Image (cartoon, rainbow, N blue to C red):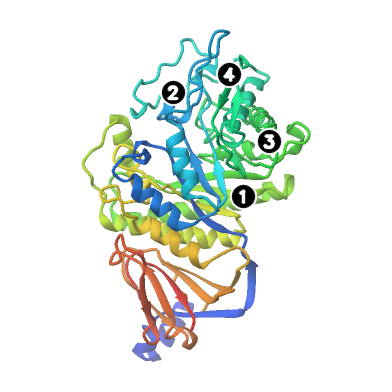
Amino acid sequence: MFSSILLAVLSVLPAAAQESKPVLEINWNKTILVSRSTPTLQVVTNPMLNPGAPIHDGSFAALKELGADYVRYVPWLPYPKIAVAELEPPTKEKTSWDFTHIDPVTKDFLAATNGHSTIINFSTIPAWMFKTDQPVKYPDDPNQVFWDYTKGTELRDPTGKELGDYYGRLVSWFTKGGFTDENGKRHESGYHYGFPYWEVLNEVDFEHNTTPEDYTKRYDAIVEGIRKVSPETKFMGLALAAPGSNPKYFEYFLNPKNHKPGIPLDYISFHFYASPALDESLDGWQHTFFNQAAGFITLTRYVIAIRDRLSPYTKIDTDELGVILPTDDFEIRASKALPDHIPHRYWNAAAALYGHLFIELSRLGVDVIGESQLVGYPSQFPSVSMMNYNTGKPNARYWVLKMIKDNFHPGDKLVETGGKAQPSDVSIQGFNTPQGRKVLLVNRTNAEKTIKVAAELQNASTLTVDEESGDEPPRVGTVNGDELKLAPFAVSILSLK
């Protein structure tokens, strides 16, 4: 019955009306939320960031130019000599403290982010602190990738004091000019950096078979060790790789009763990477990326509900957001680079995913929205890179982040955004900002989209990152008339004049 009525109505409508394009309308007077969200990124150490590496200079110049806050810095397990400051257990005769391969990249990072907040995470616990059948051997070459460093599940010191002392000394090296080691010997650095935020370990659900109970004990021990030398530092916990796999991490960790008295729960963090199937191309990615993102957004709502119930003042950082193509795993297994195979438009698709996640997570009130990562390259997660590893120039993922970071800030007002027949495959959000009215649009498809805009948006100025802009800054333009065309996976910001 209803279908016959609909057909009858359509039959009398003019063809133009039946084919009318979506109309973008924004109610600037109806605020749905005041933004709490800061867009940012993470920097993971690897040999391409070492002084003298081919894209070192371009990468740190891009990081400095970005000027982001809450930048996450992670020296981690594939390069033990870059990530771990004490690689051998101390004896009565000597200790093995050595920052030779740690300091250069860390100093360059802190110089590039000077004046902005950072989140430091030396994520790898020295292997000798765990009970293992045999000592863990690691490469002599600091630049040789080694994926098998994180052995053991139980700490040899179950109290956690040894663990906390290690991190206290490491932080003291950078913030207090040096430290005194286990044998009473002073090690001088001369550094007096400030560490406003420290994230405690990384992806513990994947490393050392860490239970929620074990992680909470280790978090408390590390926080105690660091606070002795840096009492002003705030702390971030969990950094889960698969936050939907075990909700007990959130339930247990966010319950203050499970921590020692006085231990702060300033932030929690967790990650999301879209993971397409091996046989997918761009036409498949346009669905997989955003369908999986929808699941992550739903998960985030549940995390927020747990947070609100147990520790409502704890903030949230989604500090690894991106795509990991299945071919990255082939290179990791081979421990070598394979021929570059990533199509140019992929970078726009991955950039569009971040733009979409920024809109959705901002609507949920997530505090920090972090893209992963500054530098990847063949053999080292090339698909997550924000730098073109062949040229040393920022790619589309970087430019979308910078465009969003430059235009949207905490305190902006998200307004009611919609209109008749709003396109379901274009993400759109209007913002009232101190600089004026702005609209963020993300084409989530591998096809051009045309949107009909209301009169007030006609002649708005535009910034756009798409395949045409390539590895260059966003293209500057103007809305011409009542239609806006978005190229495949384009991200655009409209600013009203």
- Of residues 491 and 447, which is closer to you in this image? 491
Q: Amino acid under label 1?
A: Ile
First in sequence, mark 1 or 4: give its number: 4
With respect to residue 171, does 6 lie above or below? below
Label 4 Cα neighbours within 10 Å, binned few <14 / some 14-19 / many ≥20: some
First in sequence, mark 2 or 4: give its number: 2
> Depth-wise, is mark 3 or mark 1 nearer the camera?
1
Element type at mark 3? helix
Query: Viewed as shown, does residue 57 lie left or right of 207?
Result: left
Q: CA distance from mark 1 to mark 4?
A: 29 Å
Contact (Cβ within 8 Å) of mark 2 with mark 3: no
Residue visible at 42% across and 30% down in the picture: 101
Q: CA distance from mark 2 to mark 3?
A: 27 Å
Disc 4 target residue: 154
Q: Amino acid under label 2?
A: Tyr
First in sequence, mark 3 or 1: give its number: 3
Label 1 Cα neighbours within 10 Å, binned few <14 / some 14-19 / many ≥20: many
Residue 72 location (% of width, % of height): 51, 45
Disc 1 target residue: 316
> Depth-wise, is mark 2 or mark 4 nearer the camera?
2
The image quarter in which residue 196 lies: top right
Residue 276 seen from this side: no
First in sequence, mark 3 or 4: give its number: 4
Residue visible at 64% across and 30% down in the picture: 222
Q: CA distance from mark 2 to mark 4?
A: 15 Å
Disc 3 target residue: 252
Q: CA distance from mark 3 to mark 4?
A: 19 Å
